[in-house]
Image: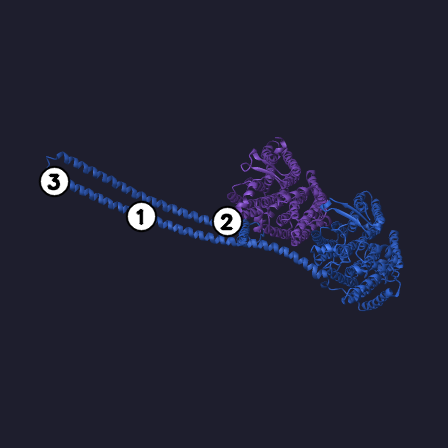
Amino acid sequence: MIFTSFLPVAAILVPWLGALAVFLAGYLSEKLRNLLAVLVALATCGIVLSLYPYVQAGTAVYRFADLMSFGLYFRVDFLSFVFAALFSLSWLFATIYATVYMKKEHAQNRFYLFLLLTFAHCLGVVLAGDLFSLFLFFELMTFSSYVLVIHRQTPGAIRAGNIAIYMGVAGGLALLMGIFIIFAGVGSLDLVPMLERILAAGINPLLVIPLFMVGFGIKMGMAPLHIWMPRAYEEGPSPINAISSAAMLKAGAYGMIRIMGMVFTPANPSVMPAGAEVIKHIGLAVIWFGIFTMVMGAALAILQHNAKRILAYSSVSQMGYILMCIGVAAFLGFEKGAIGFSGAMYHIINHSVFKAALFMVVGAVYLITLDVDISRVRGMMKKLPFLAIVFLISYVAIAGVPGGSGYASKAIMHRAIVYAYKYGGEFTSLWVAEKFYVLASAMTVVYFAKLFAGMFLGKMRKEHVSLNFRVSPLIKAILFLYSATILAVGFFPNFVLNRIVIPAGAGFSFDAYGFKALKEINFFLWYDLQEPLLVFALAAVMYLVLDHKRIFDWKAPEWLSIEYSFFLPTARFFFRTCCNFGTAFDTAINRTYLQSGKIATEMCKYITVFDSSVNKVYESSGGAARRLAEQAEKFDGVINEAYEKSGGVARKIADGAEQFDGVINEAYEKSGGVARMIADGAEQFDGVINEAYEKSGQMARQLADKTAELDSSLGEVYEQSGEHSRSLWERMRGSQSDWNIKNLNFDSLLIALTLGLFLIILLYYTRFN
Amino acid sequence: MNFSQHLPALIVVVPLLFAFVMPLLARWRKQWCVPVTLGAIIFSFAAALQMAFQVMSTGPFSYYMGDWPPPWGIELGIDYLAAFAALTINGVGLLIIWFGSKDLLHELKPEVLGWYYTLYLLLMASMVGIVITNDIFNMFVFLEICAIASCGIISIKESRDCIEAAFKYLVLSVLGSGAFLLAVALLYMVTGHLNFTFMAEALPEAMVLYPNNLLVAMGLLVVGLGVKAALFPLHVWLPDAHSSAPSPSSAVLSALVIKVYAVAMIRLLYLVFPRELLGIAPVMEMILWMSTLAIIIGSMFAIVQDDIKKMLAYSSIAQIGYVFLGVGLMSESALVGGILHIFNHATMKSMLFLAAGAFIYGTGARKLSELKGIGHTMPIPTIAFCIGAFSMVGIPITSGFISKWYLALGALDVGRPFFTAVILISSLLNGIYYLPIVVNAFFSKPEEAVPAPKQLPREMLVPLALLSFGVILFGVYPSLILGIVYRAAQLLLGL
């Protein structure tokens, strides 16, 4: 049955709008704000729980078609409901707890605003009906929870927040990449089994699932992506630690379950599509990631002194258990996978309860001592017996002692890993995995023993004796509720299993027989009791050895941590690359500049050399002109002579003619006079020509002088301009010190180069294609 | 002939006319400058809105200047892309100058204020002209006006940096124009037309006869417009120009001016050049790689900046890369993403520059380290900056996410997941340089006591608030604008 219901939207809108109302109310009165915050959490809780009838009968859906171009889609099935109920109850208690815890903190309005916003986004993650909406709320949760992590605004908190947010954003992007690939291939992002369609679209799960694993793994603290957690937990206020552990980590686990257990499973399990066996191998890898996480988290927890850090690493380790079970579910697939799924779900519920209780106990101690380092805060048992008892009950639960809630879930998880070995085919490595599982469980017992012994036993320090050891009744009430839940689940494990865990498996492609077999488990039989006994024996030995060898106090060298050996160098390398790249670019430009400056100077030199040679040419050409003029003068003289000679000849002729005249004087008297007149005219003409020639010679000489002058002045101009351009280059070359990208020549060069490259490539392609 | 028929011409002519009225007003009626400028741009905005509705209801239409039909007269073609771009230009330009009406008072000398409005109106007119014209030579003319006006609004500040940057911008932009003009000449040589439609008809035949002419023209166009649009590695002028200019100028240059050239390039490559030519010559592939480099290297350069406006300028280089990535991928989704990013980036980058301008106005602080704790003293600009930063990173519910969504899907549609990864990695890089600013603004305390900042006037707060509202609105309801973008992409791809 599919019901259209506005309730899922209301469950997100109420805390969202409530957050704003609480923020505004904070300006009026603190009490009103706190009350309103609790009421909003309560109302949200009520809305979520009222979804129960729908999910019992089917699913509740609501769709906004137009939003964000893809549409927001809410779809609540039983699994979503379980998570949402878990989150809203945790948030309700954490909010009540916060009203006591945060009394003396600064910026409380902001705290409540983001506490409730994060609540809304966290609910959005589990109520979302497709991967797109899930991603949307996941991303919003990252950002709103950031403000909670850095609430104290100390340098340590800012640093923790930075790591958290960058990893969160990177994880979100990995997730988005996976979503893109699935959407482009399949065309749908619904949370339904669709392995067949994914494989048919040619998507390789080996490439896509790791993207999701990174995205969700960062949020759930999967090693080696857990490094943001211990810092963030140490710096965040206790109520935030409680909800982070109880809800935000679980949101990551929820995503993992949806991807591994649902989206990447076949819709029709009876016909396995070709290529589906790769899922089994991925499942195996996830199992090992889980084992690695649980062992590493436990080992690191043993080495810590800060109670919050111990609990943070403990959360890492416990998430490893859950991850391992998700791996088993994927590994065993349809036939036996139900056990893995149930183990993961059961432990998610239990861990939410007892880890929240533990963080609240530590927070209550912090409120009194303002310190949670167990090398200083000791011997609280006498003064704070109630907290010690709650701590012990939670300890019983997390250690898996029968009677505590963790016992049943650990029993199922142990069965899961055993089944994986038994039914999963020939994988000897799983036999080893089971041993690691036992080892991690024993280590859990050890580090909690260390924490308990440190904080509650031993001798109290002098400065703590005089403190006021009053625990607020509200805190006591919450812790009482938590302890009661732990014990109730511990004594009646089958109730939770049958009513909550197994119905949540509806909609998954797991064999119904698997669930049926689970229903009939009696946890208090020898088969399941063996494992805790072995664990405790191992833990006792381990504790004694570690205590004797003083390994508890051992401080691990920095290079051992993943952060120092991998993440920080990577970040440093990246920033160095950015800087180097930038300066290299600048330097290259400057070099080009310098080089072009040098070339220009050389060229200027050549130009001046050229100038002077031109000058010489001019000068010599001036000389040549002078010489030419002289020659012309000489020539003139020659012509003069020739004319004079010709004048003489004419006179001689005239004399001859006179003699001739004397011979025939009388007869030709008149004609003789005429001839004389002609001779005179010729003489005069000669003189005129003579003068003209002389003048032209002078003119030529003057012209030659003028050109010579012009030459030298031109030469000067050239030399001056050469000098000028040289100094211009010198100025434009700039000094080595100003690293900038201000070079026009270089820019134009770049444009020319790009253009050239473009054309060459274009022409190449047309010529040869 | 009714009034609304002439809107395509009026949308250019009205701001152009008022641009030349402005110096007179500045001389006689100083206080009228701002209202008249705003009025002219509001008119253009209304006209653009009307044209957009008309295009959406009756399809693309064209307007003949002076009733001369092409190929003789100049044709203005209003298609989906033109209407969309005109709307973006006028809408964002209006908010920027509204903000600027107060911000400029402290950045400019009083005697040049009137000239600023002249230049601004010229710039608006030329940008609208570039996107709506259907004639390549007319486009060239508008390109020149645009280049000169944008140099003007940088150098009007008369500081050494501004003039240097403006001079550099001028020289490079003229080089770009030169390349464009050469390309126009080459195209005219082989087709005999200047009108896009006629050119597109003549080109398939010309391609066979004179392939080299066309290739050279295409190279010149891509490089010429690439210089103006600051496509990597031709971006070298941008960081100086955009960071030294007065804040409203930076906003309009980064948000609108570089986009206009991208629109011009989209139009030329998709509508004018024959598709076969794009198949033969790998021009799209080259644009793709240039944009990839722009996205990654622009972000890497932005990370090491410590001046807020310079960082924003480098970020623009990366963001223009997204637009060209959408152009180069040649799939419907990617083109939708690219065109949508023109709008989204215009809103968010103008908002970021205006917020930076508000910080400078209030405290005089330009260095990122001086902005610690500014979230408490100047909440509204900081929240606006914060929303802009989230949008740049691509957080859902902001508009930046939508364009990245389409671009990434477009890359996968053509089977190139590498470019999807590029988009996502660049989102992370954006986060690396934007988020610390937001964190410092809200959660760090300044090292020394800082004097209380100047109170921002309402004229500066309202545009910031409107822009941030727009970023969220178009992030949640992208369908408001997706309709026209989709049709634009389909028209361009010939679907």
**Left or right placement of residue A162 versus residue B217 in this view:** right
Residue A628 - label:
1
Residue at (47% x, 53% y) in the render:
A603
Q: What element carries label 2?
A: helix
The location of residue B27, given as percent across then percent down, is 59, 33
**Hey, what amino acid is under mark 1?**
Leu
Tell me the chain of label 2: A
**Measured along the vertical axis of the image, is residue A159 above or below residue A69?**
below
Q: Nearer the viewer, mark 2 or mark 3?
A: 3
N-terminal label among 2 and 1: 1
Mark positioned earlier in the residue sequence (2 or 3): 3
Name the tint of chain A in the rendering: blue
The reply to whether dot 3 and dot 1 touch (C-beta < 8 Å) is: no
Q: How crowded is mark 2: few (under 14 residues within 10 Å), some or many (20 or more)?
A: few
Label 3, label 1: how far apart the Cα atoms are? 45 Å
Seen in the picture, residue B311 relative to A287 is either above or below; the reply is above
User: Is there any visible trace of residue A395 in the rendered image?
Assistant: no
Quarter of the image with the C terminus of chain A is bottom right
**Residue A39 coordinates in the image, percent (x, y):** 84, 46
In this rendered view, identify the residue nearer to me: A512 or B393: A512
Residue B352 placed where, x, y %?
Answer: 67, 45
Q: Which amino acid does label 3 sit on?
A: Gln
Are the residues under marks 2 and 3 on the same chain?
A: yes
Q: Residue flagged by tag 2: what amino acid is it?
A: Leu
Q: Nearer the viewer, residue B129 or B237?
A: B129
Mark 3 vs 1, N-terminal side: 1
Q: Quadrant of residue A36?
A: top right
Label 1 lies in what chain?
A: A
- Marks 2 and 1 share the same chain: yes
**Could you tell me which chain the residue with mark 3 belongs to?**
A
